[in-house]
Amino acid sequence: MLDMALTPTGHPVLFETIASEQVDPNAATAALPEGAVKSLREAFQKGPSELLLCLATLPDRAALPPVFAFWRGLGERYLTELCHIPEPAENLMQPLPAPLDELAEMACSAVSLPRPLCLLAGGELTVTVRGKGRGGRNTEFVLASLVELGKSDIEGLDWLILSLGTDGLDGPTDAAGAWADASTVERARGLGLDPAASLDDNDSYSFFKRTENLIITGPTGTNVMDLRVFLLRAA
């Protein structure tokens, strides 16, 4: 039966799996729109980006198996972002903003996935400084993600988000970055910390220092990129 997954390098792949005796071997493809299986296989032969584009533009809006529904949603988000790159042409070199407001939506949609999910991203972000706090681009990203995830009611999931600089340095701090999960929210609440207020003051370093979520490695002597990781699994 037809299935999808991510390679270790972050590329979506399409492959055939052998169903167990207890599972209908046609179950995974039965809910796919007519002709979709053939279209997806043909697109995959052209490359991962063609596969995502094919999923994002499937004409039939019928219900899909959970894995394909998730990837179609991700493909649609990616396609939408590409279509909203601002003009003029010189702005094409500017990085797209991190879709923090979609992290919670993505987490909720992952509840029905049959296996854990790991999303990876790289590259350096920028921070607009409005407050008087202390922090770097990576700790700021994790705190902003924590704020956005806190706006949604996420149940039945374990999640973790992490962002760090591979050089071991994050802005004017001694941290490489930070990580957070549901327990971070509880610790912050017990300490009387307000994630949104800390974010408004650009005080992500102080926030995660108190919750003990800083990642401190010291200078690593290398500088590949900033790395962001988002993990999801059923609780």
Image: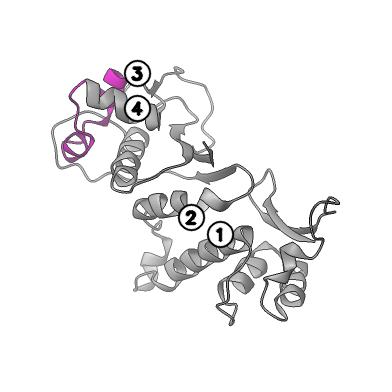
Whole-percent x, y for residue 64 in the image: 61, 68
Could you say whether the residue bearing mark 4 is in a helix, strand or loop?
A: helix
* Magenta segment: 191-212
Q: Residues within 10 Å of mark 4 (few under 14, many from 20)?
A: some
Q: Residue at x 15, y 42 (%)?
A: 130
Whole-percent x, y for residue 154 in the image: 39, 45
Mark 2 against mark 3, which lies toward the viewer?
A: 2
User: Which badge, 2 or 1, is on the more N-terminal residue?
Assistant: 1
Say whether residue 72 is left or right of residue 143: right
**Residue 98 visible from this viewpoint:** no
Figure quadrant of the N terminus: bottom right
What's the distance in space between the residues labelled 2 and 3, CA to CA?
A: 29 Å
What's the distance in space between the residues labelled 4 and 1, CA to CA?
A: 27 Å
Q: Residue at x 58, y 71 (%)?
A: 63
Q: Residues within 10 Å of mark 3 (few under 14, many from 20)?
A: some
Whole-percent x, y for residue 202 in the image: 21, 36
Q: How many marks?
A: 4
**Residue 12 visible from this viewpoint:** yes
**Dot 4 amino acid type:** Thr
Outermost residue toward the front?
Answer: 22
Q: Residue 184 got which mark? A: 4
What's the distance in space between the residues labelled 4 and 3, CA to CA?
A: 9 Å
